[in-house]
Image (cartoon, grey):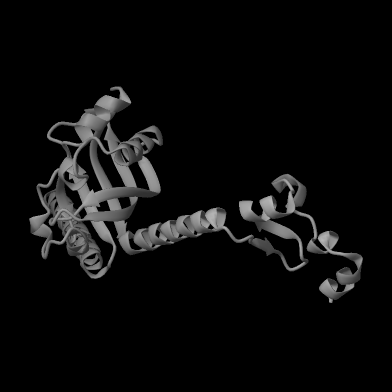
Amino acid sequence: LVKQANSQKSSRQKAEMMNINQHQQTKQDIKKSGERFLSFMEQTDEGFFLFETDTPIPVSLAVEEQIRLLYTAKVVECNHAQARMYGFADAKELIGKTLAELHGGTNIPKNIEFLRSCIENGYRINGATSSELDRNGNTRWFSNNIIGVVENNELVRVWGTQTDITERKQTAEALERSEFKFRALYENAPIPYHSLDNEGCFLDINPAWLRLLGYKREEIIGCNYADLLHPDWKARFKK
């Protein structure tokens, strides 16, 4: 009996030691996984962030009220890439900033719609654009991927990634302004202008052209230029 009891005790001790070793191994694996993730966060050019509010936000609240509370959320974690997007040298400088501070206030329509879309899509959104301010008050444009964590019907935190698209946005706006100026010049020019496709069909005409020849726009767009020429010139144009 004594030998049996000692054997059982030894088996329990071995089992306990195995459980302890497994527990320690699991902790080490989790630690290594966390370290790998942190290393990735610090080496990527993409911004990572985590926002939290002082108290969880009930998902049953009206969307407008949820937006108001989301603007009080603070950055509790981020990587250096995220901080640099706002002109900070270190992630620690961004910690504690509220969403309202980064959005340049709580009344910018595009940003309100950005948050509304996130809420209405179940606190998940991909590729959404936000307009924000860096530490010097300069407007920056970001593309955001966001995942809200909901527990017990309350939004407890918001994870996300962010890419700076300011240069792309500025280029697009400059191109739009250039196209607007060209269109204004084209439409108001005293000289007749038209544009044709590869087949010689009219794509566009300006008012001076219509006034000179007495046509209406809908009569010309899509027609072939050769149809307006004297018969002697049609063959030459087609060549």
Q: Is residue 130 visible?
A: yes
User: How many discs mark residues in the rendered view?
Assistant: 0
For the C terminus, the image quarter is: bottom right
Q: Is residue 221 left or right of residue 128?
A: right
Q: Position of residue 145 (x, y in %)?
A: 35, 50
Residue at image point 73% right, 54% down = 213
Give whichever of 81, 210 is nearer the camera: 210
Q: Based on the displayed image, in which of its 4 quarters is residue 147 positioned?
A: top left
Does residue 135 lie above or below 146 as drawn? Answer: below
Give whichever of 226, 136 is nearer the camera: 226
Does residue 47 lie above or below 237 as drawn? Answer: above
Q: Is residue 232 left or right of residue 145?
A: right
Residue at image point 77% right, 65% down = 200
Q: Based on the displayed image, in which of its 4 quarters is residue 174 positioned?
A: bottom left
Residue at image point 78% right, 66% down = 199
Q: Position of residue 233 (x, y in %)?
A: 86, 71
Give whichever of 231, 39 is nearer the camera: 231
Q: Is residue 95 left or right of residue 138?
A: left
Residue at image point 77% right, 47% down = 219
Q: Is residue 206 visible?
A: no
Q: Position of residue 170 (x, y in %)?
A: 35, 60
Give whichever of 168, 78 is nearer the camera: 168
Q: Position of residue 108 (x, y in %)?
A: 27, 39
Does residue 225 lie above or below 5 as drawn? Answer: below
Q: Based on the displayed image, in which of its 4 quarters is residue 111 positioned?
A: top left
